């Protein structure tokens, strides 16, 4: 065991002495720190930061936070699905509460534990998969910061052939002005296993905070993973959510990013189909109101033939809300019979809101089917009149139409209870945004 | 008894005048049919009463039980008791019939009061049975992928749930085969009663065999040119609209 500290950097001061991390992890942190310092900060002319707001990336004021004031209260506020296979609650990077999986699941080989424990107890798996994919979409510097930082979160290993019926729920809270958190979720679904994981990111207050989150999803042959991230940071928070998914032979990953909070949110989602028959559903529901900016970059990487990727991102914008979508479908040489779909749909509810969409294709194989498209529209006048003619008030009618727009994405969730849970959170935020 | 009174109504869309001095008195407890050739302004009349924003009332009035509703927003008119069964109902992606109707009924409750879910579903299922709609309909998105007949049945379902004082049925028979027409008509007839007035707009007499009107009005060029009992519809069926359009043609020739 070893520890390292970096002084003179508020974000890191005092952070790295906490916890018991193995040598390999400490070495990885040090590399991360070196990379963070060496990599240039993004500038507006970077293609990968086009239409974004690099000024939002001033991180000087953020620092490593003290423990939360009232852990019990935050655990209490971690209302989720009610029933789950396991439930972990973190606050300001520290574990507040954990409900381990039932004994029979543990006996069957299911592992759900903190990343810190797993770094020692499952060092081989964690080291193999922890941030193993290159960060290609523009935020390598912030991925390095995450790697160097006081990460905390959950490691999940679903063993071969095990189907975990209930979702595994993880809550990450941030509390206090200028607090910085580094949530990490690492999921390995082994061959023919099945699981659902829900990450919930929440603020304990309305303060400005910094969140730098990463998740690594590994879905091996024939396995099926549903992963949902519901981001509800305060409207003063700067956040990164960097996702990397690898999907194996005949495996399927359904990933859904739900962005409801944050002031500046940068999401990067990279999905690599590494074997034939792989399928990746990349879904996202985003509400950008007030002064919010949600900037998302995606990459559907078809490395092998006969794989499918299906991306559907939908944004509702109000106030001075801004969204950016930049997506690439890449079909590598030899990845014939690729079936890739990419669609972004924006519904713009105010004159001052702005949606930028940049779909893209890079195809280096023959006999592929790739389609992409972007649409931006307002609420349809005919649809609106139809609702008004039934006595529904204009505000309620608008909300109903936008929820209908989002439901076309939420309907893709296979679990009705989870779907209802997510829909409830989206509806609540939408209602507040439309009234705001 | 309440009255929906249209008083010398003139309506334009852009520079084009569509209704040119139309008057009509529809009391509750009666069914009035409006027949007329294409382009005579029948649908415009229905949409104007519902408050469609594309049309401008240049003069005249629409009175709901003596009170002008011209300044009322469409949603307020609907809550007051006006219902338009659309000729071309909109598809509302992602909004289920159950959610849509719940929102419509919720809007009629006083602020802070919540719709009672059990009662709501009991009523919804009762009305769906009346219209021979399977229960799975409730979880389908409003009108999305519906056949013509399903759309019209869905309109009548909404009418049955919202129980309007005055219902305007705009070409409810269009696109229906005979079986669907019978089901829809049965639904409409079951909603007839002393508390409801209906304005049935149609191009064809066929519908009026199933929904038998108390009065029939013939509309040509934005005006009612003839009113009578249901026998008038049979005359139109036999003779067409030519006799009614001639005076207008002569007027143009002058």
Image (spheres, grey):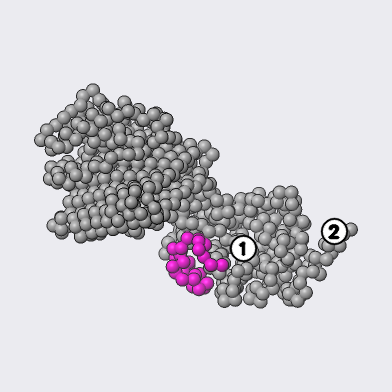
Instruction: Give the left or right position of residue A321, taking residue A160 as reference.
Output: right
Q: Nearer the viewer, residue B65 or B77?
A: B77
Q: Is residue B136 magenta?
A: yes
Give the residue number, with chain letter if any, for mark 1. Answer: B87
The answer to whether residue B221 is seen in the rendering is: yes
| Total marks placed | 2
Q: Residue at x 14, y 44 (%)?
A: A123
- Which percent across, then down, holds residue A221? 24, 56
Please name the residue shown 39% across and 50% down the image. A311
Q: Is residue A168 left or right of residue A347?
A: left
Is residue A32 found left or right of A177 in the rendered image?
Answer: left
Q: Residue furthest top?
A: A8
Task: Give the labeled residue for mark 2.
Answer: B252
Q: Quadrant of residue B41?
A: bottom right
Check the residue under mark 1 and report the chain it is in: B
What secondary structure is found at the residue carrying circle 1?
A: loop
Cα–Cα gap, marks 1 and 2:
31 Å
The residue nearer to you, when weighing A164 against B98, is A164
Tell me, yes or no, whether the highlighted magenta stretch contains residue A138. no
Residues in magenta, as a range? B121-148
Rendered location of residue B232, percent (x, y): 75, 73
- Against B86, residue A30 (above or below) is above
| Sequence-first tag of 1 and 2 | 1
Which of the pair A199/B169 is nearer the observer?
A199
> Where residue B150 sits: x, y (%)?
53, 68
- Residue A253 in view of the camera: no
* Element carrying mark 2: helix
């Amino acid at each position: 065991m070893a520890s390292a500290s970096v002084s003179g950097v508020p974000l890191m001061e005092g952070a790295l002495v906490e916890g018991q991390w193995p040598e390999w992890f400490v070495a990885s942190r040090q590399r991360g720190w070196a990379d963070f310092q060496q990599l240039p900060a993004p500038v507006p002319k970077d293609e990968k930061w086009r239409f974004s707001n690099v000024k939002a990336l001033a991180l000087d004021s953020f620092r490593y936070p003290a423990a939360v004031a009232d852990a019990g209260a935050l655990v209490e506020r971690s209302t989720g699905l009610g029933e789950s296979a396991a439930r972990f609650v973190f606050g300001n990077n520290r574990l507040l509460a954990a409900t381990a999986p039932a004994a029979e699941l543990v006996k069957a080989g299911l592992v759900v534990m903190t990343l810190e424990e797993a770094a020692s107890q499952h060092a081989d798996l964690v080291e193999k998969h922890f941030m193993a994919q290159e960060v290609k979409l523009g935020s390598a510097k912030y991925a390095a910061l995450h790697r160097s930082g006081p990460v905390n979160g959950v490691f999940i290993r679903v063993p071969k052939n095990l189907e975990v019926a209930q979702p595994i729920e993880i809550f990450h809270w941030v509390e206090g002005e200028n607090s910085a958190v580094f949530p990490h979720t690492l999921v390995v679904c082994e061959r023919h296993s099945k699981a659902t994981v829900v990450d919930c990111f929440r603020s304990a207050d309305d303060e400005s905070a910094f969140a730098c989150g990463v998740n690594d999803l590994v879905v091996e042959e024939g396995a099926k993973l549903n992963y949902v991230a519901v981001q509800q940071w305060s409207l003063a928070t700067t956040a990164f959510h960097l996702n990397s998914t690898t999907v194996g032979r005949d495996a399927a990953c359904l990933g859904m990013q739900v962005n409801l909070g944050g002031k500046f949110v940068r999401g990067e989602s990279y999905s690599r189909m590494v074997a034939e028959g792989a399928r990746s559903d990349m879904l996202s529901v985003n509400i950008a109101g007030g002064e919010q900016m949600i900037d998302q970059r995606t990459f559907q990487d078809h490395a092998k033939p006969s794989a499918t990727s299906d991306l559907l991102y939908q944004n509702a914008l109000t106030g001075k809300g801004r969204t950016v979508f930049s997506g690439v479908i890449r079909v590598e040489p030899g990845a014939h019979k690729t079936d890739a779909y990419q669609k972004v749909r924006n519904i713009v509810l105010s004159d001052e809101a702005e949606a930028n969409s940049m779909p893209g294709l890079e195809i280096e194989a023959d006999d592929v089917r790739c389609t992409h498209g972007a649409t931006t529209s307002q609420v349809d006048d005919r649809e609106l009149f139809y609702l008004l003619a039934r006595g529904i008030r204009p505000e309620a009618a608008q909300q109903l139409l936008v929820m209908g727009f989002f439901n076309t994405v939420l309907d893709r969730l296979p679990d009705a209870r989870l779907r209802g849970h997510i829909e409830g959170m989206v509806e609540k935020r939408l209602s507040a945004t439309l009234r705001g | 008894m309440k009255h929906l009174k249209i008083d010398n109504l003139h309506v334009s869309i852009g520079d084009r005048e569509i209704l040119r001095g139309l008057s009509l008195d529809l009391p509750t407890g009666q069914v009035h049919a409006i027949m007329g050739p294409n382009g005579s302004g029948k649908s415009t009349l229905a949409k104007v009463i519902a408050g469609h924003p594309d049309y401008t009332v240049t003069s005249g009035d629409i009175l709901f039980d003596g009170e002008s509703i011209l300044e009322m927003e469409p949603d307020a008119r609907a809550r007051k008791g006006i219902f338009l069964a659309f000729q071309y109902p909109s598809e509302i992606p992602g909004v289920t019939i159950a959610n849509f109707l719940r929102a419509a009924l919720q809007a009629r409750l006083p602020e802070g009061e919540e719709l009672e879910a059990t009662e709501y579903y009991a009523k919804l299922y009762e009305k769906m049975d009346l219209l021979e709609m399977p229960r799975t309909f409730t979880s389908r998105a409003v009108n999305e992928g519906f056949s013509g007949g399903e759309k019209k049945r869905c309109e009548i379902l909404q009418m049955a749930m919202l129980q309007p004082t005055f219902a305007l049925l705009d070409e409810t028979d269009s696109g229906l085969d005979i079986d669907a027409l019978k089901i829809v008509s049965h639904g409409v007839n079951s909603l007839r009663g002393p508390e409801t007035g209906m304005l049935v707009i149609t191009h064809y007499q066929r519908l009026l065999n199933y929904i038998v009107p108390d009065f029939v009005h013939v509309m040509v060029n934005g005006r009612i040119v003839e009113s009578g009992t249901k026998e008038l519809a049979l005359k139109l069926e036999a003779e067409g609209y030519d006799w009614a359009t001639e005076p207008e043609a002569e007027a143009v020739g002058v």
